[in-house]
Amino acid sequence: MAAIASASPRTLIPPRPRHHGAAPSPSTSDVSSLRLLRAHPRHVRRSRGVSISMPVARSRSFVFSPRAVADSKSSQTCLDPDASTSVLGIILGGGAGTRLYPLTKKRAKPAVPLGANYRLIDIPVSNCLNSNISKIYVLTQFNSASLNRHLSRAYGSNIGGYKNEGFVEVLAAQQSPDNPNWFQGTADAVRQYLWLFEEHNVMEFLILAGDHLYRMDYEKFIQAHRETNADITVAALPMDEKRATAFGLMKIDEEGRIIEFAEKPKGEQLKAMMVDTTILGLDDVRAKEMPYIASMGIYVFSKDVMLQLLREQFPEANDFGSEVIPGATSIGKRVQAYLYDGYWEDIGTIAAFYNANLGITKKPMPDFSFYDRFAPIYTQPRHLPPSKVLDADVTDSVIGEGCVIKNCKINHSVVGLRSCISEGAIIEDSLLMGADYYETEADKKLLAEKGGIPIGIGKNSCIRRAIIDKNARIGDNVKILNADNVQEAARETDGYFIKGGIVTVIKDALLPSGTVI
């Protein structure tokens, strides 16, 4: 059994080694040598992680750190100016989240609970903080109350300290004299707040999604953007042929510059999008396995380029991925690809969300680990008591804070904070999100007198392959088994949905004793 402890956002981030002092600007000959170096990726691969001194006409040298995949442990960053003062993080809260319904019935997608103790928004915010980016805006427009509350509780203090004035602020969709509409897409959302973003004295805008699960060092991402003198840098995932057909693919030249886009290509069009991923840092074996690259929806824009593209070049464009980025390429902007070769999941559907959560129970290594001392995931400090497990059989599971688990069986499941599971219950292959509050003994007594059901899982109930949203009241002897293997069902009045064969019990729902699903 594993228990995840909440990490306070006020915890000091462990220092990482840095180079001090400003690096000298490259001369024309330096740039030529640099291009020559990039034209020979095999030389770059042999030298990855080692600084290469390139002699110039003057008596000093220009230090170039070869590019590497984002999760490479060997490479170091040397940003000047520092990311805390030169980069603005912009996290997009996403749309209505219809594919994640009913989890998004009462909350925005980034506010959906994750991994027993966290919420999805904690992932990009934590990645920013661990990457020394402390100026962060979150753009929202749908069901944003719980997201706003979580962000204010988790990151409300001055993150970067007095000197750097770090912050995490929510920007909701609003009407203005210039634009009376809601956000029409990712690019439109940023455009509507450009007047605010341009006030910040930064070099780059880092555009992120609020519903992705991954761990990434954005400093390396930004360093690659600066080293290649790019206008835009797009984070890319290496893909095999089987998965590539479900993504928007990119084609690059020998310098890693993006020259072509294709949305979910198939057949000959797919074959035409094959690239040499050794250019971006993969070794020969992995490059043969993964000959395609797909956009992750994560971008670095140079500030002046962003202002120009959204206001002058493409004032009507609503989306970055399908309009602004391809448009920038077509007018000659330098759009670079940056390879990320680690775990990444777009939490866009119930199945993806379910699999991502249960993936953290995998042995011997989870798909995504919350146990990283150098890159922790932060969340709001709740000051909950430790979980209590009384005569229970718990295997291959993750248990959140403040749970009370009595004489039951839990296998391959994630149990969220404040979960109460009664005697005789069986929980298998399931995700329990827990509760927002405890009920007192007086509350429970009053409920019993009225024939009500307390929050939590009742006695002798059996739950398999299901998601139980927060504050659900599951009575005694309830069976959630989907024995008929129903794939799709909308039973909102009964308190549940079935999508992809996974039963999802709605937040605050009540399932009477003896219910069978």
Image (cartoon, helix red, strand yellow):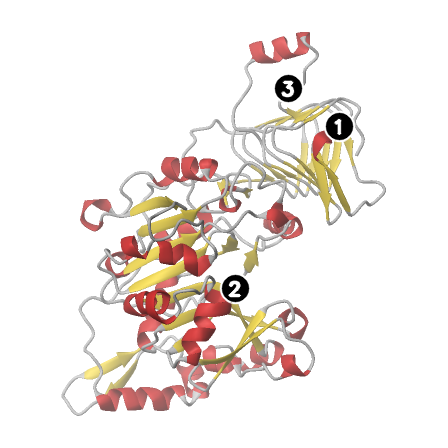
The amino acid type, in three-letter code, at marker 3 is Pro
**Image mark count:** 3
Q: Which numbered dot is residue 461? A: 1
Q: Relative to 142, does residue 459 appear above or below in the rendering? A: above
Label 1: element kind: loop
Q: Is residue 158 left or right of residue 249?
A: left
Residue 423: x and y in percent read 71, 23
Q: Of helix, strand and loop, which one carries label 2?
A: loop
- Density class for disc 3 (Cα within 10 Å; few <14, some 14-19, many ≥20) is many
Closer to the chain start, of discs 3 and 1, is 3
Q: CA distance from mark 2 to mark 3?
A: 42 Å
Q: Nearer the viewer, residue 413 or 91?
A: 91
Which mark, residue 342?
2
Name which of mark 2 and mark 1 comes first in the sequence. Answer: 2
Q: CA distance from mark 2 to mark 1?
A: 38 Å
| Residue 419 falls left or right of residue 340 | right
Quadrant in the picture for the C terminus: top right
Please rate how many residues cluster around mark 1, counting C-alpha atoms within 10 Å: few if below 14, some from 14 to 19, many from 20. many
Left or right relative to 381: residue 512: right
Q: Earlier in the sequence, mark 2 or mark 3?
A: 2
Query: Disc 1 marks which amino acid?
Result: Ser
User: Could you tell me which residue is drawn at 41 percent across and 46 percent down?
Assistant: 173
Residue 255 shows in the view: yes
Q: Which residue is mark 3?
A: 454
Q: Residue at x 35, y 72 (%)?
A: 225
Q: Quadrant of residue 512?
A: top right
Q: Nearer the viewer, mark 2 or mark 3?
A: 3
User: How far is disc 3 from disc 1 in space, using C-alphas?
Assistant: 14 Å
Which percent across, then down, holds residue 493? 71, 30
